[in-house]
Image: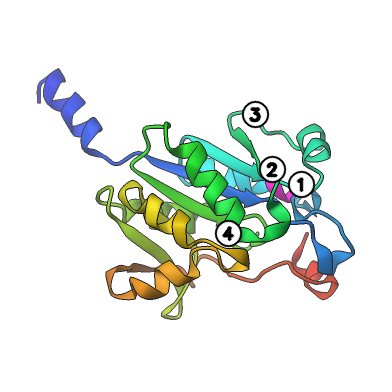
Amino acid sequence: MTDSETDSTKRAEPVVAGLLLAAGGGRRLGGRPKALLEHRGRPLAEYALHILREGGCGPVHVVLGAEAAEVGQRVDLSGSTPVDNPDWEQGMGSSLRAGLASLSTSGADAALVLLVDQPGIGAEAVARVRGACRSRSSLVAAAYDGRRGHPVLFGADRWGDIASSAVGDRGARDYLKAHEEEITLVECSDVAQAYDIDTVDDLIHLE
């Protein structure tokens, strides 16, 4: 294989950006921002960024909202692009819109979206979902015993429509429901657990 053929092969592989949604204020956790909760010796946002990179995503953008200044001071965001979402209290939809907008000039072919409050999802699940990306129109989601979950991957050609439908706390739920037959499901139940850290009782999952 010639050098030019090798370069062509490399270019043919989709560029999958990582998009971490970490703006939540943790209302049901007593107002503790989820990004700053500790897990395995580091803040959840830092842990999740590591998972995205280890899973092969790049570039990586992280959407911040609640206590963004403190998160910026306490979390190692090196190697990622912080995105401020001043409307974070409006729900996950605003963070998804902000994140996709920030990636619009990144040159990425797809965005793999990870939620900061799901530390049971590791690099292997991220890598499986990322590996299923085939084009800028790809729509991929992890599955747990056949049920759709996170992370979710959106091809860049879909970002505009997804952003338009992302309102409140529903995020991309309406878009995914409307395009259910187009989703490639990647089973991840053998390597990940899709629990959320939403309430004080859920803190038992943190190590």
* Residue for badge 1: 43
| Mark 1 vs 3, N-terminal side | 1
Magenta region, residue range = 42-46
Using the rendered image of the protein, determine whether residue 187 is visible from the camera's viewpoint.
Answer: no
Q: Nearer the viewer, mark 4 or mark 3?
A: 4
Mark 1 residue type = Pro
Q: Residue furthest front?
A: 164
* Structural distance between the alpha carbons of marks 4 and 1: 23 Å
Q: Quadrant of residue 82?
A: top right
Quarter of the picture containing the N terminus is: top left
- Categorize mark 4 by other alpha carbons within 10 Å: few (<14), some (14-19), many (20+): many
Observer-nearest residue: 67 or 201?
A: 67
> At x 62% / y 65%, what residue is drawn?
168
| Mark 3 vs 2, N-terminal side | 2
Circles 4, 1 touching at the beta carbon (< 8 Å): no
Circles 1, 2 touching at the beta carbon (< 8 Å): yes
Using the rendered image of the protein, determine whether residue 114 is visible from the camera's viewpoint.
Answer: yes
* Residue for badge 4: 93
* Residue for badge 3: 78
Mark 2 residue type = Glu
Q: Quadrant of residue 99?
A: top right
